[in-house]
Amino acid sequence: LLLSFGSILFGGVPTMHRTTRLKVTDINQRFICVLCDGYLIDATTIVECLHSFCRTCIVQYLENSRYCPVCDVQVHKTKPLLSIRSDTTLQDVVYKLIPGLYQSK
């Protein structure tokens, strides 16, 4: 996986460009739901701590708990589902890095 970072000056002239090589296995864990051990599907993030999970996994988990399964931060005391948000940007990254996942979902 290659990540490119650049800075743009006024007029769109590039001033600096750096490419970093990363192994997919090094970043793969960021796209795994700790509740089901699968790739994130319908990525959903807890707003208090920013940990992300599959939507179905975290909704089911919050039926019985009011704490993040990763860091134990308390989510909304009475209505925990008010503390989660869809993370379409994260989901888009997962679909781009894991070819075929979108079709198999």
Image: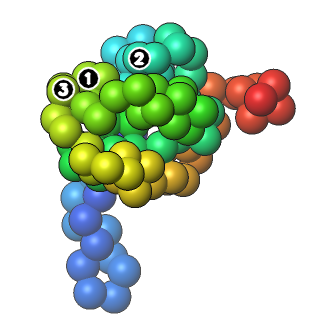
Q: Which numbered dot is residue 34?
A: 2
Q: Position of residue 2 (x, y in %)?
A: 43, 33
Quarter where residue 95 is shown: top right
Q: Secondary structure at mark 3?
A: loop
Mark 3 / mark 2, whichever is N-terminal: 2
Cα separation, mark 2 vs mark 1, equals 8 Å
Residue situated in front as seen by the camera: 62 or 78: 78
Q: Position of residue 56 (x, y in %)?
A: 60, 33
Cα separation, mark 3 vs mark 2, equals 12 Å
Residue situated in front as seen by the camera: 84 or 1: 84
Asked if the residue under mark 1 is in contact with the one under mark 3, i.e. CB atoms within 8 Å, the reply is yes
Quarter where residue 3 is shown: top left
| Residue shown at the point (82%, 32%) measured from the top left | 103
**Which residue is tagged 1?**
70
Mark 2 / mark 1, whichever is N-terminal: 2
The three-letter amino acid code for the residue at tag 2 is: Val
Residue situated in front as seen by the camera: 79 or 69: 79
| Residue shown at the point (81%, 25%) measured from the top left | 104
Residue 72 shows in this picture: yes
Q: Secondary structure at mark 1?
A: loop
**Which residue is tagged 3?**
71
Name the image quarter holding the C terminus.
top right
